[in-house]
Amino acid sequence: MKRVALFSDGWKRLITYAWVDGMMKFISRSDEKICLYQYNCHGNWSRDEKHNHGEYNIYTLPDLSEFDGIIMDCTNISDKYYFDWLVDMIRKSNKPTVSIGSDIEGFYYAGIDNKKPIADLMDHLYHKHHCRKYVFAGGPKENYENSLRVLSYWESLDRFGLSRENNPVWYGDYDFSTGVKYFEQFIKGFRGRMIEFPDVFVCANDNIAAGFCYKAQQSGYQIPGDFKITGFDNLDKALYFDPQITTVGHMRENIGNKTMEILADVWAGKDVPRNHFMPSKCIFSESCGCPNSGLLDYRKYARGQVIAEVDKLEKEELLTKLESDIVKCNTYDEVFRQIAEYFMSLACDGFAIVIDKRLYEGVAESELVTDGYDRDNLVVAYATEGKRMLNIKELSELKQYYEKTGARNAYMFTPIHFREKAVGYSILKNGRFLYDNPYFYDIHSTITKTVENLYKKLQLEIANKKMREIYNRDQLTGLYNRIAYTEMIDPEYCKHCESGRKCVINFVDADNFKQVNDTFGHEKGDMILKKIANVLVSKCPKEGFVYRYGGDEFIAFFPVDKESEADLFKEEVIAQLGRDDISVSIGQAITDPASDRVFDDYMKIADDEMYKIKVAKKEKGGLRKR
């Protein structure tokens, strides 16, 4: 089986699934068994650089030595640092690579010829509509395809003998709002003077053209009456806009198909040319003064809009239900199950979540990695295909499963991260729903935020537990203090009563402690208290607890199966302390589960016995009366 790695970056919150659709059409027809692994992120969406780093980190996941070919979708990777880093990583792999959206030295290229359609548009505008004054409303200056369209625009101006200076180029983004801003800035530039429009605004894409037209119409201007405008890409925005926008048509699916064809030819040992240009054509329409293209069936369009709206509402209801369901979840596993069920209700074939197992422990955020993935700590938290849950927990098992069943399938890997901290990723198998519902980022953000909230909740619980431990511990001896005794002892006593077990209460008091303090100082007294605490803990059974009750008094409480265990405890404690010349008095009380007595009754018995022992020692010579 051939394995192909596809690196892609979403356009803002959207995913361009058309490339994948075209690739999968080729794969489904090919005699070669091919599996597509897509590593997708949204690294250009946020203004938070640390968040974007967490997104681009998904590119570190694959071991490229295990792949047979690579496709790099450069269209939306706008950060130069990550772009160059990815190119360098791919080059070092020495694998055949096809780029989309940027011509990179050493890579094959698949895309449209960005220059010819612009030249054809310019010729049409110049000769057919006699346009002599132009503005190119462009996309990002550093974008490869935009730069080619600008170059073709300039070459056309030179061919017509027109000045580049008087026919400017604007740079912005590729979205609708960029077109709106362009119009607003253009109008503002006249500052009360009579507005003089160019003959035509040549826009880098349909989004910009639609935004420009919309704002112009809002301001009372007519297109093409006051000026002409063109777009590029033949999106719905061009076809359905009023006026219908002159544009350039091409099929993204064909580009995806061509990338796979190139790799297949390379694998077959064929002599493959470096550049591959897909056909495109100008579609002249109303916005440049031509008749409607006739490509639009309004009845079909209206029907499609109704169906799309119903489908959109259904998907929004599903997402709302998911958000409602996962809010009620208290564990990661509950969340992952809900998420998997949600995805399997859409048009896809499988879903898995891989997570850093230390999240379950609430590990400190500082221990989570920022570069790459801590593979030794990654586990498969949940995996499903269809209605079948996969009993897979180890990454090696998941990898073997994909190797066995992955032919003619596409797996999309998407990062799960807390800002720059990498904590895992999701894997979506054949996510066909992305073609008509590209807002995967919104869905995935819900997943990430929920996982992060659970993580922070667990961290808070751990912090509270640590604070409680500090609050409940005696600082000198490390034993539970009187506060902890008050909170813990009754529940422990009741628990053993319910199970029918007897318990022993040991009331321990240091002998002559005030005299020691007065004679040898508090340091000596502290040393004795710590020694008593250590011996009590060492002799107390695992099910028991030792408390510093106050001053030189201690409580040791534990269940016993035989009353002789209580005697043994007392004897061993007294003997071991005696070897260090430390004397204690221990009063004991053994509980009866069948009795109606409460804990305080037994506590008084133990206290009274301890006092009697003290009195007896005094009478024998030495202890002062309490």
Image (cartoon, rainbow, N blue to C red):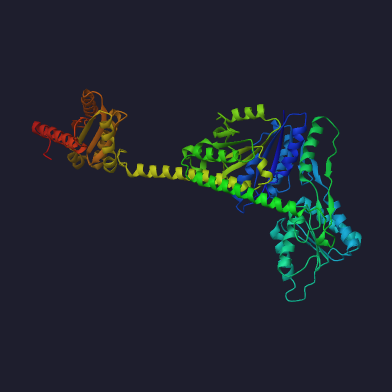
Task: Name the quadrant containing residue 64.
Answer: top right
Asked if residue 11 lies left or right of residue 478, the reply is right
Instruction: Say which residue appears at 72% left-offset and 38% top-offset.
Output: 90
Instruction: Say which residue appears at 70% left-offset and 63% top-offset.
Output: 180
What is the x, y in percent for residue 150? 81, 56
What is the x, y in percent for residue 197? 80, 69
* Residue 223 position (above or below residue 300): below
Work out which quarter of the rendered image holds the N terminus and state it. Answer: top right
The reply to whether residue 510 is visible in this rendering is: no
Name the residue nearer the viewer: 300 or 242.
Answer: 300
What is the x, y in percent for residue 345? 59, 40
Work out which quarter of the rendered image holds the C terminus and state it. Answer: top left
Asked if residue 552 lies left or right of residue 232, the reply is left
* Residue 224 position (above or below residue 543): below
Task: Name the quadrant containing residue 294.
Answer: bottom right
Name the residue nearer the viewer: 345 or 401.
Answer: 345
Name the residue nearer the viewer: 49 or 260.
Answer: 260
Instruction: Say which residue appears at 84% left-offset and 46% top-offset.
Output: 279
The reply to whether residue 219 is visible in this rendering is: yes
